[in-house]
Image: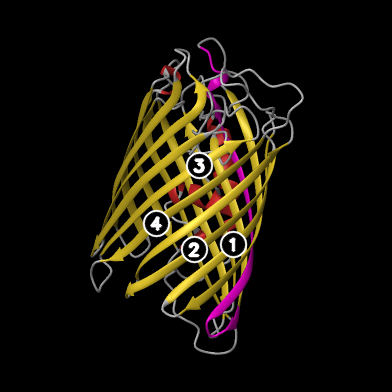
Amino acid sequence: MTFKPVSPLLRKSRLTSHHMSLSILLFVFLFLYPKTTQALYNNNTDTTTAGKTRTSSMEVNQILDGLLGKDPLRVEYDFEEPTAKDWSMFSGFKAGMGFGRKENILESNSLIVNSNLQYLLMDFYLSYADIDSNSLLFYLTADNYNYYETELSDNERIIMAQIQGKRQANEKASYGLNLEYVIQQYYDSLDASSDNDVSILHQHEIEISTFWNQQLEGFNGQLNLALIRNSIEETDDDYSAIAFKAELSKQYRLNSNVALFFESTNSYYDNLKTKHPDGTSVPGTRLETSKQEIGLKNRHIWSTDKSLKTLFELEYLVKQDNGPGYYNYNQLQVSGALTFQIDSWKIESSAESVNYDYDKQLTSDNETLQIWLLTLDCSIEKRISGRWSLKGEYEYQNSYSNDSEETYTTHLIMLTASLQI
């Protein structure tokens, strides 16, 4: 799993019924226990020099796809459909602990930090639904990385809470409201040196969005409008954003579909200034950025028992700023994932290639910045009993660029035991 911050200026970023009290107890355990072990836990922000702009433009849901392996809005919960007008309650809970090792934790070319790690996870959801497809969902998830390297003074973690309400307008349309709150804590490698601790950053993001789903003659359309507020306590990267997304999908066989989507986001920064191509700030300005993204995705089920699934996505994004163009870039992203499950075994693999082509931002060699990021991940999970499972995972990430500061390689290997109730 790669830790990926939310800010568009940051690249490094990344069942059955149960009682809420257990999830709260585990939540406390996850984030108090690592402190008692004195174990220690990457990322960066772009506030100063050229060639240091972190290029991810991932929104919260995209982060959850990569970091948690699922988006709570699209989770396939294993519960029966309601059969009566009365509201039915469903809930699920998962907790786990893992150990592993990561090479080049800071995703840096100048300061290489390797460490053994402890990983803690928790997922909880509570859902109310009726036979008419009206629903209310509460979702809470947390991941904590606890590194033992003494240069790192704290843990990396992400906590996300979501509440979503959906109402069926008629047989072919539904609408709803979604509220998400994300807290992240991660390292700022730009502030790292061999003779002092790496700075820790604390990021908060809140998103309020509305959505409308409509069936259209064999197609399904969806519109989303979101307001976003993002802040990082230790930097001047705070911003507000408004995002619009439209998606049209077609189900061509049971549980398989293809979708075309368009998304537009405008971000308004509180204090950041626009920059010249060499990275120097333009006095008297305030940064605004716009992003337009178009994409195609295909989710395919290859067998009637759903044992083999694939996901393919192709996305193209253009980002522009309101200044000389330091933050302008084109992004091409291709990704795919495969899941194969048979009996008590599950095998998952994924690959993602992202290319960033900057218009004007210059490297130290006076070339326009280019970055190619490749991520490969594979895992094998074995269900030991009805509730316990054991998972082994390996992730490889390689960033190649014409700027040495953006060139690095990381490796992560991890073994996790989890309990699902």
Where residue 44 appears, as percent x and y from the top left, is: 55, 28
* Amino acid type, mark 2: Glu
**Label annotation for residue 247:** 2
In primary-sequence order, the first of circles 1 and 3 is 1
At 37% from the left edge and 50% from the top edge, which residue is drawn?
314
Q: Are marks 1 and 4 in contact (CB under 8 Å)?
A: no
Of residues 121 and 275, the one drawn nearer to the viewer in this rendering: 275
Where residue 246 appears, as percent x and y from the top left, is: 53, 61
Q: How far apart are marks 2 and 3 (CA)?
A: 18 Å
* Amino acid type, mark 4: Leu
Quarter of image, res 219: bottom left
Q: Nearer the viewer, mark 1 or mark 3?
A: 3
Q: Are marks 4 and 2 in contact (CB under 8 Å)?
A: no
* Amino acid type, mark 1: Asn
Dot 3: few (<14), some (14–19), or many (≥20) neighbours within 10 Å?
Answer: some
Q: Do the residues labelled 1 and 2 touch (CB within 8 Å)?
A: yes
Q: Give the range drawn in magenta.
A: 168-193
Where residue 207 appears, as percent x and y from the top left, is: 65, 53
Q: How far apart are marks 3 and 4 (CA)?
A: 16 Å
Per the picture, the main secondary structure of the magenta-coloured stretch is strand
- Disc 2 on helix, strand or loop? strand
**Label annotation for residue 296:** 4
- Disc 1 on helix, strand or loop? strand
In primary-sequence order, the first of circles 4 and 2 is 2
| Residue hosting label 1 | 224
Where residue 305 appears, as percent x and y from the top left, is: 25, 72
**Above or below, comparing residue 304 to residue 234 in the picture:** below
In primary-sequence order, the first of circles 1 and 2 is 1
